[in-house]
Amino acid sequence: MGKPVQLLAIGLLASSCGADGGPFSAAPPVAEEVPGPPALATIHDPVLIAEDGAFYLYSTGSPDHSPLRAHRSRDLANWTDLAPPFALPEWTRQAVPGSRGAWAPDISRYDEGFRLYYSVSTFGSQVSAIGLATSPTLDPSANDYGWTDQGPVITSAVGDDYNAIDPNLVVDREGRAWLSFGSFWGGLMLVELDPESGLPKEGAQVTNIARRPQDPENAIEAPFIFEREGWYYLLASFDRCCRGADSTYKTVIGRSRDIRGPYVDRTGRAMLDGGGTVIASAQAADRFQGPGHPGHFRDAEGRDILVFHAYDTAAEGRPTLRIGELLWDAGWPELKMLEPSE
């Protein structure tokens, strides 16, 4: 059964930061560039989009990059650090006392502009909020650039059936807008949005689309839904992030004909029963541990690009940007990592 979405109505109108599931501290810079696949240091919870031939990457903030981070690239290998898109509005402090910044952004083109959803919480807490900001463009040098606070979207409190973090906007084949979100507690959720405001529709019900009932902690979070050839694919992260090289994150996927589910993995196991086909994980000897919190992007060539973070054992467990391509076989993907351009 669904549950009415909880909204917070307090004033409008900034801080350092955290990581998904809690705050993290940036590792000290290394003396020289670390060789290997595309590596952008101290990146957590990345999402990718393109505008006018440039790629824009948004990610969780850190104590010295508050409240969110932004980067731009022409080739997915060489990145320019941009100023944080905006300072957090005052309502976030009221909604989540003690919060220091924003986590796990989601960026989407919508109508004539862009919608940036983001999370505000504190480590291990269910007192959380998802906010929304909009801008006509992503280019900070454009005359019409500027983010407008649209206020809180969804909030959660102790005892609710969900945790209001890790948002992802998806538009279905009929043009209806939805927001997936969730972390631990009740698992992953879906709610329909009003297309004009980007906020939940009046009377909208929150639907549970994935959980891990056999796991004592229900360790699932970071949903991301995209459509391909008549299927909706649900990406998620299992287990624990934010522990550096000891992180146990892995990325899983399931699919459904209906955006509301049921989502099943390649074996047919329902994601509401703990199912999920693993497409990114790490062995003990691997350099990059805990690959998770994926963001999907379909490029101009039709490639399905996946951005996510993993913890680099060659750089003191620093969360690092990873980029791969999903290669498809019989409707299911395998992840191939992309090497940096020469």
Image (spheres, helix red, strand yellow):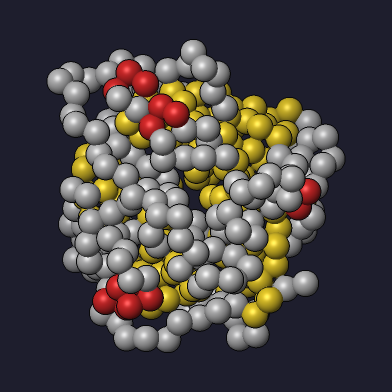
Please state the horizontal and vertical placement of residue 66, each as a whole percent of the image: 23, 55
Tell me the quarter of the picture where residue 35 sits: top left
- Figure check: 24 above or below 164: above
Tell me the quarter of the picture where residue 114 sits: bottom left
Q: Would residue 180 be found to the left or right of residue 140 on screen?
A: right
> In front here: 128 or 133?
128
Residue at the (37%, 21%) spot, across then down: 313
Please state the horizontal and vertical placement of residue 52, each as a whole percent of the image: 34, 50
Residue at the (41%, 27%) spot, across then down: 245
Tell me the quarter of the picture where residue 28 sits: top left
Total marks in image: 0
Q: Can residue 165 be seen in this view?
A: yes
- Judged from this view, the residue extending furthest toward the front is 216
The N terminus: image quadrant: bottom right
The C terminus: image quadrant: top left
Q: Would residue 139 be found to the left or right of residue 38 on screen?
A: left
Q: Would residue 291 be found to the left or right of residue 269 on screen?
A: left
- Figure check: 45 above or below 286: below
- Figure check: 79 above or below 132: above
Please state the horizontal and vertical placement of residue 82, each as a whole percent of the image: 21, 48
- Judged from this view, the residue extending furthest toward the right is 268
Q: Is residue 85 visible?
A: no
- Figure check: 308 above or below 147: above
Please state the horizontal and vertical placement of residue 13, each as a whole percent of the image: 26, 79
Residue at the (54%, 23%) spot, across then down: 282
- Judged from this view, the residue extending furthest toward the left is 31
